[in-house]
Amino acid sequence: MKKPEILAPAGDLEKLKMAVLYGADAVYLAGRHFGMRAFAGNFTEEEMLEGLAFAHRHGAKVYVTLNIFANNDDIQRLTAYMQRLARLGVDALIIADPGVFALAREIVPEIPIHISTQANTTNWRSALFWQEIGAKRVVLAREVTLAEIAEIRSRTELELEVFVHGAMCWAYSGRCYLSHHLTGRSANRGECAQACRWKYSLMEEKHPGKYLPVFEDDRGIHILNARDLCLLAYLPDLVKAGVNSFKIEGRMKSAYYVATVTRVYRQALDAFFADTQNFIENRLWHEELHKISHRPYSSGFLLGNPGEDGQEFSSTQQLASHEFVGVVRAYDSQKKRAVVEMRNRFAENEFLSVFGPATEPREFRVASLKNSLGEPIQEAIRVQELVSLAMPFPVAEYSLLRREIKV
């Protein structure tokens, strides 16, 4: 068995660095155009160059998304953009549109092409088609089952990439027109308004203006709200089925989300390959995945159509047992103080936990808190301000601070 890569989302430069440091073998990102997450931070070409240098220095690859469904007026801009990406040295392009694929093969034949999940590859004949015209990898549709993945593997030679964690779309592999119909923002051009998460009621034809809840519940019903995907328990099965890349969704999520999820899947995959015969899941991995913002988890379509178990009808509210409060930017070993970039309020004497790329979570009490001017303060309240605090043990740069949410 060949060890699959862990592929993590990089919505901006900080998230790229978090993903790489916390265990990703590769990241996927977009420039300011042509990707399926128009409202992520995304990358200028200068940021992309810095991100590429950082990733390559740490032995990780960078894949760039060009997976919109292009209009005629996109073609000329795409041509020039692909040429610039080639000069930057990206490791692959992620493409869905056949015309964009053909253009890339013509303009930048040296860059490997990965077929986006937006292309809806659900069977081995489709995968074989992409293989025969020059694709290196296909990102399988989320609706493909484990048995179907194994059959696709047995009939093709190209690399197979599978989503293992993150948000699910209610529409078939993301081919959704609801957002465009209701808001004019096309999901297929990276501008999804997530209309599937809205609260809906029924209106009877002969009683306009009278709205009825779908069930007898005055809160309404979230009829299109898919649960989040979590395939942590099935990593060994996916490895044995021949998957080459485990993909984590989340370019719109926080750096804390990216670091936590990447770290969990890295640890689980490494543990499996360290002893495939006696591998046992660590309950702490699942606990970590409940400390980030998420909807109730589901195994998606991996074992078949999940039916009602794949939907969350009661609420679109995100769950989380912990809250992200800061990023360590430096540590002074002589003074035993950490410099922290604040992301959410925290105060002296409260208990936080901190974990890093190579360290397990440890709890400590906030003491001797100072602002960026070195003045004592009782509470850190300015987002992204650099504050310092006593830290009773060494912590690495890019370590993350969080607090338990008290219910």
Image (cartoon, helix red, strand yellow):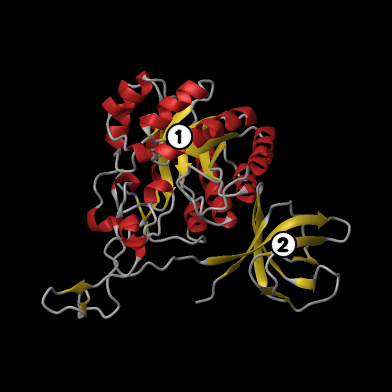
Furthest residue toward top: 132
Provide residue 350's location: percent of width, then percent of height: 68, 75
* Most foreground residue, 310 or 359: 310
From the viewer's perspective, tell me whether residue 386 is left or right of residue 37. right
For mark 2, what is the residue? 341
Tell me if residue 210 comes above or below residue 281 in the rendering: below
Residue at image point 31% right, 23% down: 129
Amino acid on which the number 2 mark rests in the picture: Glu
Residue at image point 65% right, 65% down: 343
Give the image quarter of residue 355: bottom right
Provide residue 336's location: percent of width, then percent of height: 83, 61
Provide residue 206's location: percent of width, then percent of height: 10, 77
Element type at marker 1? Answer: helix
Element type at marker 2? Answer: strand
From the viewer's perspective, tell me whether residue 394 is left or right of residue 30. right
Which quadrant, please, contains the N terminus? top left
For mark 1, what is the residue? 75
* Most foreground residue, 4 or 98: 98
